[in-house]
Image (spheres, rainbow, N blue to C red):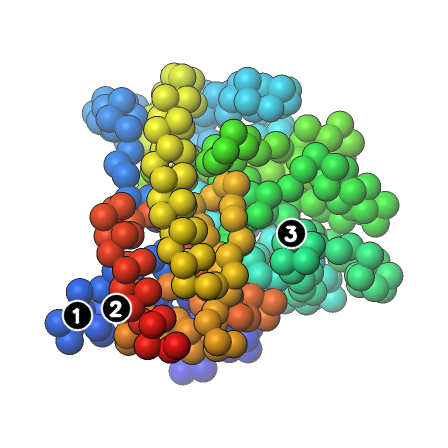
């Protein structure tokens, strides 16, 4: 049985391959430390769990949910944007609920791009931006992110012909995998570009509430003209340790929100209403005690990793956000060679930068979502492995 040609264009999904490597080494009796996947190791706050338990017991929530998300959830998200970013959103026309951002990213791409269209994608980036464009039959045009530019794209390098064919442009700040951040000045530049060429600007704000050294991320929708051409994805996964709950929202441009909601209504039945009810509690109860403690923990872990990598004489980018540390491979190894080396010599799994795009070659990503004592152990193992290369 033969798959469609578009399926043959897809690379293996990065995290499935990392899982395979870990399972193989564990089967051989090795104690593996997996720093490859960004999945929070802390539990969902108890008050959110209690809200879910109560909502799940309500028979009214056992029926089909609203395709676009419940009105109450969409209102809670719009009120959160007002408090957090001073942005007023109409909950009925400018907010759509999602079964996690990944689902929304896929469905939006299918709704807005197709054969003959171009999707502008940062390189390196979360692989789903590219794979969904491929599945939609669109052409992916990479926007290299380099250390020299603080991992911000240079839009001046995009050919005019590409800009005229482009239907979507993805930005993701705070950035996965590099940990880079963007300013409102950057957003003004990209909003101006997208308005000029009628490109849908897609902002993935998954790491908005993670910040170190006093940093707090802005929203692209804080630029007044952004609503003409921008849609933003806001997920509860990372700030509230709710990755498994699959709950998020897309907000912004009415036409894009409507297109996404319409396609979703043909493909899924919306997030479980009890999960939406718990998400409302998460968004309406003061979340800053949770955020403050989370950021303290991640900053402590970040600093442990930065010190260790500097002691290994590796070039490292200091992040102000996300729970990732992006650093160069040793001795000009490829990212695949370096990742394999640390698996074999240190029993530590790192994400190879090339898995996020060609411009990720020569880099590795560490995730800080591992217990602190295990993170310390991983750094010690990596130091021993590095000493063997001297």
x and y, in percent, of residue 257 in the image: 62, 37
- Residue 10 visible, this angle: no
Name the foreground residue: 108 vs 281: 281
Is residue 53 toward the left or the right of residue 271 in the image?
left
**In the rendered view, would you say 324 is above or below 337?**
above
Q: Residue at x 40, y 34 (%)?
A: 295
Q: Are marks 2 and 1 in contact (CB under 8 Å)?
A: yes
Residue 191: x, y in percent?
76, 40
Earlier-in-chain disc, 3 versus 2: 3
Residue matched to label 3: 150
Residue sitting at 78 percent across and 42 percent down? 189
Q: Which residue is mark 2?
A: 347
How many residues crowd around disc 2 within 10 Å: few (fewer than 14), some, or many (20 or more)? many
The residues tagged by marks 1 and 3 sit, at their Cα atoms, a distance apart of 37 Å
Q: What residue appears at the point 61 percent right and 62 percent down from the top-left corner?
A: 123
Quarter occupied by the N terminus: bottom left
- Snapshot quadrant of residue 245: top left
Question: Relative to residue 130, is residue 48 drawn left or right?
Answer: left
Residue 329 percent location from the top left of the image: 48, 69
Element type at mark 3 = loop
- Sequence-wise first label, 1 or 3: 1
Q: Is residue 147 above or below residue 59?
A: below
């Amino acid at each position: 049985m033969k798959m469609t040609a578009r399926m043959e264009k897809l690379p293996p999904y990065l995290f499935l391959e990392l899982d395979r490597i870990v399972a193989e080494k564990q089967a051989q009796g090795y104690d593996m430390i997996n720093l490859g996947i960004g999945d929070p190791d802390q539990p969902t706050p108890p008050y959110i769990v209690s809200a879910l338990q109560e909502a799940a017991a309500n028979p009214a929530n056992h029926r089909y949910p609203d395709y676009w998300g419940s009105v109450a959830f969409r209102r809670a998200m719009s009120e959160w944007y007002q408090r957090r970013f001073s942005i007023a959103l109409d909950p009925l026309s400018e907010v759509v609920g999602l079964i996690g951002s990944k689902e929304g990213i896929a469905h939006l791409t299918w709704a807005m791009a197709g054969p003959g269209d171009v999707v502008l994608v940062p390189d390196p980036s979360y692989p789903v931006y590219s794979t969904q464009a491929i599945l939609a039959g669109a052409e992916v045009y990479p926007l290299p992110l380099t250390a020299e530019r603080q991992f911000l794209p240079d839009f001046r390098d995009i050919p005019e012909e590409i800009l005229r064919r482009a239907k979507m442009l993805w930005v993701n700040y705070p950035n996965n995998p590099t940990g880079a951040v963007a300013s409102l000045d950057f957003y003004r530049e990209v909003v101006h570009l997208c308005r000029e060429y009628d490109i849908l600007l897609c902002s993935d704000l998954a790491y908005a509430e993670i910040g170190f050294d006093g940093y707090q991320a802005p929203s692209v929708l804080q630029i007044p003209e952004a609503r003409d051409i921008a849609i933003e994805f806001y997920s509860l996964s990372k700030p509230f340790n709710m990755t498994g709950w699959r709950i998020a929202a897309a907000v912004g441009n009415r036409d894009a929100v409507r297109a996404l909601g319409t396609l979703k209504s043909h493909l899924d039945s919306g997030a479980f209403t009890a999960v939406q009810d718990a998400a409302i509690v998460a968004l309406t109860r003061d979340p800053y005690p949770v955020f403050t403690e989370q950021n303290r923990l991640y900053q402590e872990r970040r600093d442990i990793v930065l010190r260790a990598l500097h002691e290994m004489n590796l070039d490292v980018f200091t992040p102000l956000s996300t729970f990732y540390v992006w650093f160069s491979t040793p001795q000009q190894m490829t990212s695949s060679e370096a990742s394999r080396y640390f698996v074999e010599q240190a029993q530590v799994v790192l994400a190879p930068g090339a898995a996020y795009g060609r411009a990720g070659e020569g880099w590795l990503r560490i995730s800080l979502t591992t217990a602190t004592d295990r993170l310390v152990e991983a750094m010690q193992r990596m130091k021993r492995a590095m000493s063997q290369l001297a």
